[in-house]
Image (cartoon, coloured by chain):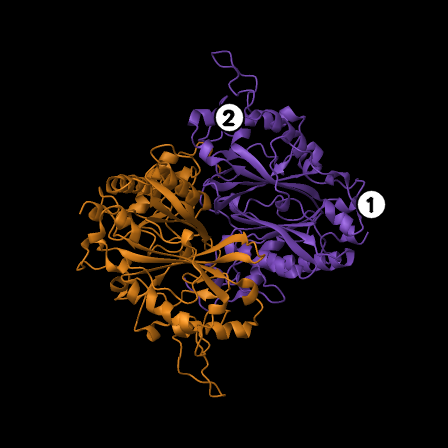
Chain colours: A orange, B purple
Amino acid sequence: MSDNNFSRRRLLGSVGAAGATGLALGAAGGVVSGATASDDTLAALTAVGSTGVPFYGEHQSGITTPLQARGHLIAFDLAPGAGRSEAVALMRRWSALAAELMEGRPAAEGDTGVALDAGPSSLTLTFGFGRSFFDRTGLVAQRPPELDPLPNFSSDQLDARRSNGDLWVQIGADDSLVAFHALRAVQKAAGAAARVRWQMNGFNRSPGATDRPMTARNLMGQVDGTRNPKPSEPDFDRRIFVPAKTAHPWMTGGSYAVVRRIRMLLDDWEQLTLKKQEQVIGRRKSDGAPLTGGSETTEIALDKTGPDGRLVVPDNAHARIAAPEQNSGAAMLRRPFSFHDGIAADGTPDAGLLFICWQADPLRGFVPVQRKLDRGDALSPFVRHEASGLFAVPGGPREGEYVGQRLLES
Amino acid sequence: MSDNNFSRRRLLGSVGAAGATGLALGAAGGVVSGATASDDTLAALTAVGSTGVPFYGEHQSGITTPLQARGHLIAFDLAPGAGRSEAVALMRRWSALAAELMEGRPAAEGDTGVALDAGPSSLTLTFGFGRSFFDRTGLVAQRPPELDPLPNFSSDQLDARRSNGDLWVQIGADDSLVAFHALRAVQKAAGAAARVRWQMNGFNRSPGATDRPMTARNLMGQVDGTRNPKPSEPDFDRRIFVPAKTAHPWMTGGSYAVVRRIRMLLDDWEQLTLKKQEQVIGRRKSDGAPLTGGSETTEIALDKTGPDGRLVVPDNAHARIAAPEQNSGAAMLRRPFSFHDGIAADGTPDAGLLFICWQADPLRGFVPVQRKLDRGDALSPFVRHEASGLFAVPGGPREGEYVGQRLLES
C-alpha cells in the first residue's frame, strides 16, 4: 500500500479534476466518494484527502461547504500607512494563494511543506471585509449599511482585541496539517500590508466518525443545527446571499458573516440533570428531537401542553426562541466550529463554539434572533459571548479575478 | 444513507467485537478496514468511527497505537490530604471509565453526550505516575530509579507549572469530539481526589488525508519519525517495555514516557531557504530521504563526503546526532502530537510538537540522545523546550484489574 515514490504532481492532476467537478462533500457527508484516482499509486489515497472544493464560482467557498474537521479564523488590520493599493495587492496575493492551496498545490513562493503528501482535504479559504476596512481604503461610499455595528446585547462580554478587524479569513479543512499550512501561508502572504489582530482555532467531527450525515453536536453534547436552512430549499439563496439587485453591486453573490466566540460554561452546564438540560434546550439530548415528540427533523409543536397544562417546550427554551417561526422567518445559516483552548486561568475549560452565521442581511438574520435570545433564553446563564465580528464576504471570484476586485476596483 | 433511528447500542455490540480482535489501525493506516457492521444500519458508519482499541492487555494502549488525529494531555496533582486510598479509588474510577469509553459506550455516570453518534474512533486513555506520586502515596520504596528527575539541558526553558505532576493521562482519538468527551470525563471522574495541574491539546493528520502509511510531518514541514523502532523488530519490546525481570515488578509490561512541549520558532525557521533547512535536518524535505540519497527508509551514509570533501550530512545535522547508530543503539518510540495554541503574546505562533517518547529506561533512551542534541544540534536555534514530564506508565490491566493495581496494592 505504501508508495515511497508517490508523485504529488500526479495526485494534483487528479485532485484538480475532482475540484472542478465539485466533489465537495467533506465532514458531514458520511462515506465520501470523491476519489478520482487515475492510477494505482493513487488508489490508496482516500476521498478525505483527495476531495477538493472549487475556489472560483458564484459564491465563495466555506459557506455552504459541509463542516470541516478543522478550522482557523484569523483577522488582520491593514498596517499603518497601508491603503487601497496595498489592499488590492494583498487580495491578489491571497486569491492566488487560495486557488493554489485549494487544489492541493503548494504555495508558489516559500511553501513550508507542511501539507505535502496530503490532498486538499476539502480546504476552503473565505475572505471578508470588516467595517473599518472601508475607512482605511477610502471606500466608505461603497460600504453597505449591513456592516453597521451590531447592537449591544445585555449579556455581551466582548473583548475588543479579539473582535472585528479590517480583514477576516476563515480557513477550513478535513486535515489539521492542511489547515495549519494554509493559515501560515495566509499570514506569510500578508507581508507588510496587514498585521494579525486575532486568531482562533476550531474543530468539528472527523469525516467517518459518525454515520449521521447532517447534524453535528456541540461541546454541550447537544445536536446543534437541525433547523439550519438547506441549500435545496427554494428561499435559501434569498436568505443567505446578497441578490444582484442591491445598492452595492460588488456584494452580489456575497454574504454577511457574524462571528461570535461563545464560551460555554461547561462546569455549570454539566451539573444540570439531563432532564433540566433538555428543558433548557427544548430538545432531547439523545437524538435532538423536540420534547414534543418525533425525530430530529420533526417541527416543534410550540403550543403543545403537558398533563399539567404547561407548555412541553418551555417559554424560555432555546429552541423555541431561536425557531424561525418565532422570528418572522428570520434565517441564517449557522456553520460553526467548536473550540477548546485548554483550561482558563480560573480553572474552567476555555471551550465553546466559534459561532459563524451567514445571511444576506444581519438585521434580518442574526440580530433579531440574538435580541430575543438576549432577553429570555434559558441557555444564557451557560454561555458567554466573548468576542464578535461582522464581515462583508463578497461573492466568489470568476477565473482571473481576485476576491473583492469588484469592490476595490469600483 | 441517513438513518435517523441509528441505534447506538447495536453499533456498540459491533464495536466491542472489533476492539476484541484488535483492529486498531487508526490514523496512520491509510485505508482502514476495521468495520464490522453487522446489519444495514451500520454499513454507513465508516471504519474511522467504528475502530476500537482494547483497554485490557499486556501493555496500555496509546503507546504502539497508530497516531491519532487528536490528542489531549492532562496532568493532575493529588488534592491536599489525598493519599493512597484516594489514589486507589481514583485509578479504579479512571480504569472503569476508560474501559467504557474505549468501547464507545457512554460513561456510566453523568455522561455529557458529546461523543454520542460517533463510534470509539480509536480512542485510547493511557495513565502514568509522576515521581511525586510516590511521595504522596507513601510508596517511595516502590519508586523505580528510572523516575529520577531528568538532567537539566542547557537549552531548557521549562515552565514548572506546565511540567511533571503526580498523575498523567494521555488521550488520543481520531475524532475531536470523542477526544474532548474523554478529557472532560477524566476530569469529572477525578472528583475531589485530584486537581488539574496542566493540560495540552494536540493533533495529527486525519485518517485518509494521505496515502503514506507510516510517517507524519511536523509543523516545520519535515517528515518526522522515520527511524522510529517498529513493533515488528526483534528488540522492540526490550527497548520500549519494562521486562518481567525488574527490580520493580509492578512495572512489568510498562514503559516510561518523556513528555516535552517543544515550541517551534516557525517565524525563524520559515526564513531559511529549503536548502538550509535540509542541511539543518540532514534529510530532504520533500520525501524525508537522507541527503546522501535513496528513499525515506534508506540508512544515512554518515561518512559520505561531497565533491568538496565535506560531509554530505553535516556534523551537526539533526538526523545525524539523533541517529541510533550514533547513540549506542539508544532507542525510544516517539509518538507525538503537533500543537497549535494560536498566537503568543509576542506575535509568534504558539505551535510546535508535544513530543512524547516511550522507552524501557529514559537513561538509555531519551536522555543520551537529548544530551547530544543539546550540545550540538543544528536544529536547536529553532526549537525551545518549554515544559517537561516524566511518567511511569504501568503495564496494561488484565480484565478485572485497574491500572496501577500492582503498584497500589503491593
Which one is in front, A34 or B261?
B261
In the shown orientation, is residue B317 left or right of residue A16? right
> Which mark, residue B141?
1
- Compared with B308, B235 (above or below) is below
* Foreground residue among A233 and B230: A233
Q: Nearer the viewer, residue B269 or A9?
A: B269
Residue type beneath disc 2: Val
Name which quarter of the figure residue B154 lies in.
top right
Looking at the image, residue B310 lies above or below residue A379: above
Residue lying farthest to the front in this orientation:
A81
Q: Position of residue B395 (x, y in %)?
A: 71, 47
Pointer 2 or 1: first along the chain: 1
Q: State the CA–CA distance, disc 2 to disc 1.
A: 44 Å
Residue matched to label 2: B280
Q: Which mark is residue A381?
A: none
Instruction: State the SS at label 2.
Output: helix
Residue B92 pos. (x, y %) = 71, 59
Q: Position of residue B122 (x, y in %)?
A: 56, 52
Q: Residue at x 49, y 30 (%)?
A: B288
The x, y position of residue B404, in whole percent, is 74, 51
The type of residue carrying mark 1 is Ala
- Horizontal placement of A400 versus B346: left or right? left
